[in-house]
Amino acid sequence: MEITYRIDEIDKVAGKILAFAKAKCIIFNAPMGSGKTTLIKALCRHLGVKDDVSSPTFSLVNEYHGKDCAIYHFDLYRIENPIELVEIGIEEYLDNDHHLFVEWPEYAIPYLENYLELHISSLSDTQRSISLKNY
């Protein structure tokens, strides 16, 4: 599935992404500055999160609570090898029925069974294209 949108349409796009996803795990493949965290904020709003959502660049994972759900937002940019994921307890997060949003997911993919892979491309300062594929 492909979606092209303007930044001011991001909340509507978040609803489409969640409706398309067959799993609660979404991985984000996109270059720095393409809007991964901005899209994750919109997904969290759609799931009922009232707290501020920010990138967990230094903490590696942030936890949010939405309407009847927990959301774990991972930023694995600073992970240097798969062993570090085991050390932060990645398997415990995966054993639960929570939403997982994973930025920079390369090392996490071997641990995932079902997920939605999302690629973001910047078309301009205000327009993005997303390709989505369920695994």
Image (spheres, rainbow, N blue to C red):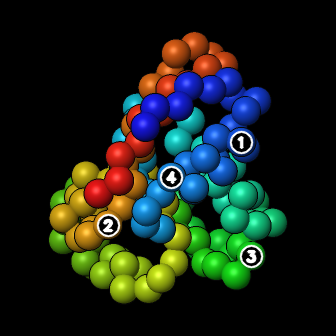
Q: Earlier in the sequence, mark 3 or mark 4?
A: 4
Q: Earlier in the sequence, mark 4 or mark 2?
A: 4
Q: Nearer the viewer, residue 20 or 90?
A: 20
- Whole-angstrom CA distance, mark 3 to mark 4, is 19 Å
Q: Earlier in the sequence, mark 4 or mark 1?
A: 1
Q: Quadrant of residue 63?
A: bottom right
Q: Earlier in the sequence, mark 1 or mark 2?
A: 1
Which of the labelled discs sits on residue 114, or is there none?
Answer: 2
Inspect the image, locate mark 3, and give the three-letter code of the amino acid beneath it.
Lys
- Whole-angstrom CA distance, mark 4 to mark 1, is 13 Å
Which residue bears the numbered disc 1? Answer: 12
Which of the labelled discs sits on residue 20, or is there none?
Answer: 4
Which residue bears the numbered disc 3? Answer: 67
Which residue is drawn at the image coordinates 71% and 42% (left, top)?
Answer: 12
Which residue is drawn at the image coordinates 47% and 57% (left, top)?
Answer: 21
Measured as percent of width and height from the top left, residue 18 is found at 57, 56
- Indicate the secondary structure of the residue bearing disc 3: loop
Q: Are marks 1 and 2 in contact (CB under 8 Å)?
A: no
Q: Residues within 10 Å of mark 1 (few under 14, many from 20)?
A: few
Which residue is drawn at the image coordinates 43% and 37% (left, top)?
Answer: 1
